[in-house]
Image (tube, helix red, strand yellow):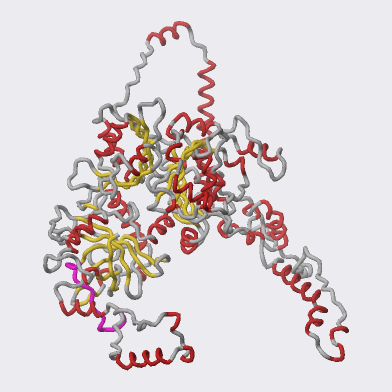
Amino acid sequence: MADASKKRKQTSDSAPRAKRARFPQKPAHNIPTISTRNAYPNGEVNVKNFLKSHENEIKSLEGAMIAAKKGLSRRAFQDVPRELRRRTASHNPNRVPKRLRRRARQEAKEDNTPITRGTSGSGIGKGKKKYLRKEGIEKSKQVWKQREQKKAEEKGSEQTGTEQGTREAFKAVPKPKTKPRFPSLATPATPPSRFRRRQRDKTWLPTHIWHTKRARMTEPKDPLWRFAIPLAPVVKAYRLTHRTAAQRGAIAWDMSYMSTIGLEGVEDSIVGLLRGLRFGAEDAEDPWQRRGKAKKWRQGTRAWEGWLHERDTRPLKRIAHVTVIWCAPEVDGKKRRAFARVHPSAFLQVWNEVVRISKVQKPAVIVEDLRFEVGSIEIMGPAAAETLCSILHPSPSDAAPDAPQSLWSTLASVTDPGVLPAGALLAFDISDPRLRDPPTPSTIHQDPSSLIETLAAWPIDSTQASSSIFSRTARLTGQRTLPSQKSINRRQSANTLGRYPEPRPTDPSIPMLIYVSRESKSWTVLLPWKCVMPVWRGIMRYPVSTGGNPRFGGLKERRQVTFERSVPSFPHDCPATDAGSSWELKQQDVRKHEWTKRPKGKRIEWSTIDLGNGRKGEIGDPWACEWARLLPNAPAEPTAAQDESEKVVTPFRQLSSAQATKLLQDPAIEPEVPYLFTVKIIVVGRGYPVDCSRVYRLPTNNPELRNKWLSLVPGPKSKTNGVPRRQQTRSGDDVSEHLRRRELASSLLEPPAPKDAPTPAEDDYPLVPDEEDLIGFVTTGNYNLAEGMPTAVANLALHRVLCIPGDKAVQKEDRICIVREPGRTVGRLATWEVV
């Protein structure tokens, strides 16, 4: 029989306890009253005197209502912000902040809720198999004891001189260390012992522990690009992300998973390396000219974003979108340094190409893998500049008035990074942000004339010194001299309340580099790996001048911001690259898993989908964007996908927007290889496209069906007959006589209203075209909050778009397409435009 003392509610033979008071900790409210004899003189009600006489009662009643609302209607855990709540442990006082634990324990005591110590974390664990972990802990303890005992025996045993001499004679001569022929890949630092097992197959970001309490992370056994990356906050953030990034506030991401490759050597050798990989070959401006932005980029005062291409392929094949940053030249130095930042999905391919071409340069270029030495934070939004100016405080120094650290505070009032020079870059050393905690709002100058003069002249181009973040010694020094949090707390407690600790000569100087991207409208901060967390905490605690704190985002929020600008995101929207093709294969498995885990009765039966005219079943793999079906000589059934261990190579080439526009205007140019180009799709009617949707052109083999689809295109908007909108009112009395006559005459001359277009629910709705009219797939689709309508980013096959009657350019009618979601039998009319 179970122990009665362990039950939640104990029974007793005595009389039942009285119901506990609703407000046990608060005294009964006594609402004071005042005589109202003066409120009714002569039997009449004077409203002013009546309200004045009852003023105290009304205020007391409102106060009692507020106190009652905050009584037992809200528990202790409900006072915790939504993003910090733990729903499954709300009953445990140890799971709420310290300031609420006393109240939570009192509530648990009154409710007779048992309080037990949790068994999660580094202890035994939960679930049915916790005994396995317990046995493992005991076994590891025994192994550790045996090792210690064996070491003690070896140390205590005495060895004779003869044995020692024999051992020394037969000692193997140490082999000289051979210099590696090729640069070696970096390995992450050894984590603490309590976290070592969890990082066996992946690496944690510097802010991993902070994110695990507030975001949904990648699965422990299924990391992304060998990193544990936050996917999305635990709270709903789709609309909040849109508002924060575009209207008010700021949103930040820990982008330390972005790979950094260091280049060091003679300037001509580094230039030859980048030109060999065709860096910037598709840009509108030549990065290798000796004037303008290109010259400033080579001097280390600008950042340049462009595409790298494979060296030996013709036509050019894209590898990845990278950002190249030069270090400002030193006074006496002959060698130059540069950073190349690349997405981790294409790092290995870029690394192999860079290492191979670096050996060809004379003199050779030194290549370094800085993935776990340089971290980064990306922040965007109207309040991004003021947040960074408050947290990134320059170290004390005797800098010139036009130096970057001197002009940094004047940029706090910048709300749009587009007003800064393209690729603007600032580099200086900063102090530990923890010494200025809590952060104070930045001083925003009200006079914009000085800021306009600074942005127009931009004196940093002539005063930017060599950044210390390019030096490994400076990076390691900045990390190793970081004081512990306990020492920071001691200095703050010994200081006067409300003031920051006085700076000391031993305070760390953290190397920092920040640059602006006009493509993503964001600020990117480069820091040493272990210095990312102090800066991140300061950013999340900063009080924005418009209210609230900066938000954080995950991988989904980063894709959302890019999607709302109708810009392709790498590698998600670049299927003609090897990295994009690998991403599509991974997403194919994810979609299939989502379909498989559903109950059999709720799955879509792909073989029973009726597309009309005797067509049964979904076209191709319903979970994948089968680009192989778009090849000119595509087989009837494409071969199965390659194994993940094999290298994924796509036969397509990705076109830039300028190249695609040129080929669409001049179809006489025969494409050498199959090309894909990125477009923005705008749905004309209702519904919105989703990932993996099929994109068709208008039917080419059925004129009747083509005319049916064209009849769904909405006509021109109704004209206002030249009447300004402000004069068009509903009331006829406010409209002059001649305007009313004009409106009456136009209404009499208008043709009869056409019949409404058929809806997908009606039988006469046009069918979707055949597979031969398939021109592409949607890679990202959703409702676009920035546009206020459903849009999508898709990739189309060039040779299928150009397969139209006659050798003429693509007309407006040819830009009409039909989008069909996989598993659906109806299509949606839409238009596409090159982006």
Q: Position of residue 559 (x, y in %)?
A: 39, 56
Residue at 28% from the left image edge and 75% from the top image edge: 826
Q: Position of residue 773 (x, y in %)?
A: 19, 68
Quarter of the image where the C terminus is located: bottom left
Q: Is residue 284 magenta?
A: no
Give the number of callouts. 0
Closer to the camera in the image, 466 or 760: 466
Quarter of the image where the N terminus is located: bottom right
Q: What segment carries the magenta color?
A: 760-773
Residue at 43% from the left image edge and 51% from the top image edge: 219
Side (left or right) of 185 relative to 85: left
Closer to the camera in the image, 405 or 213: 405
Q: Position of residue 299 (x, y in %)?
A: 37, 37
Residue 774 visible (yes or no)? yes
Q: Main secondary structure of the magenta part?
A: loop
Residue at 54% from the left image edge and 45% from the top image edge: 409
Q: Is residue 763 magenta?
A: yes
Q: Is residue 152 above or below residue 453?
A: above
Q: Which quarter of the figure has residue 355? A: top left
Q: Is residue 230 above or below residue 636?
A: above
Residue 127 visible (yes or no)? no
Q: Is residue 774 above or below residue 753?
A: above
Closer to the camera in the image, 295 or 634: 295
Closer to the camera in the image, 306 or 704: 306
Side (left or right) of 25 relative to 253: right
